[in-house]
Image (spheres, rainbow, N blue to C red):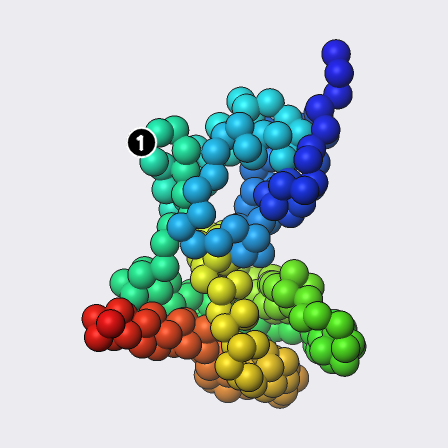
Amino acid sequence: MQKATADKSDPIAAQLAPVGRETVQDRVYSELRRALIGGLFEPSQVLTIRGLADALMTSTMPVREALGRLITEKALEALPNRSVRVPPITLERMDDLLRARILIEGEAIALAATRMNSRQIATIEGMLGEWDEMRALKHKKDVDREVTLNQAFHFEIYRACGSAVLIPMIESLWLQSGPCIRVAIYAFSDAGEVDTAHYHRTIVKAMAAQDAAGAREALIADISRPFVFLRNKLEADSKKGLSA
């Protein structure tokens, strides 16, 4: 049987890593989950089972099963023609996601503030160093790297909270927020907004001081920024559309 090959000129295929035969259902799910959290799919983007199967170099069955799980988790929406789409950005959805993230992630970071040891603090400080190295490069903005570092930074902290219940809830919220955050990163760049590392340094300072209230406040400022920015942009675009 001829081995399937992905057409990497296809935008989706270029973003997804091929999946091997072993534990294929879980690996397809994990890869699509990674792509959603990282914002590799855009809001309102339509995805087909066949297109994803070709990009992942696998059959349609594990893709169908993975999409079903992601629809259940509210990360994707089912469409009548057997395709799915990434949920569109709406004011109501952004407000709902932000409210939930402030509550859940705010509690996680407050718990972690009194639990993180010096080695863990050094790890997140090291991530700031990586961020500075990335920003010092004169090449085109590396959004994929920025998204990856941002996720690694936050989850290094959240894993220190000591709660096995909060982590899956946070992962679910990031799964739903990923497409919005990526759009915001591009918008920040165009608008010349303050770099994310500025907010992360404030978080690190609070964590090193075991300041739970300060850490929560710094986190809220960090995660609220993309949602507030996008909200203002959507409202401005809506007003322009009405006046046109």
Residue 8 position (above or below residue 179): above
13 or 167: nearer the viewer = 13
Q: Quadrant of residue 114?
A: bottom right
Which residue is at a point 45% across and 78% down the rendered structure image?
225
The furthest residue to the top: 1
Q: Is residue 169 visible?
A: no
Asked whether, in this view, residue 107 is left or right of residue 194, the answer is left
Residue 18 in view: yes
Q: Indicate the quadrant containing the C terminus: top left, top right, bottom left or bottom right.
A: bottom left
Q: Secondary structure at mark 1?
A: loop
Rendered residue at 68%/66% (across/down):
142
**Residue 195 screen position, x and y as percent:** 60, 82
Q: Is residue 174 above or below residue 103?
A: above
Name the amino acid type tagged 1.
Answer: Pro
Q: Quadrant of the N terminus?
A: top right
Which residue in the protein does label 1 denote?
A: 80
Tell me residue 90's x, y (percent). Answer: 31, 61
Who's the residue at 57% across and 65% down the image?
Answer: 158
User: Camera-side residue: 11 or 223?
Assistant: 11
**Within 10 Å of the Cα at label 1, are there few (<14), some (14-19), or many (20+) other Cα atoms?**
few
Residue that appears at 21% across and 71% down: 242
- Please state if 48 lies on the left or on the right of 158 as rendered: left
Looking at the image, the residue that sits furthest to the left is 242
The image position of residue 49, as x and y in percent, is: 50, 30
- Residue 16 vs 225, above or below: the answer is above
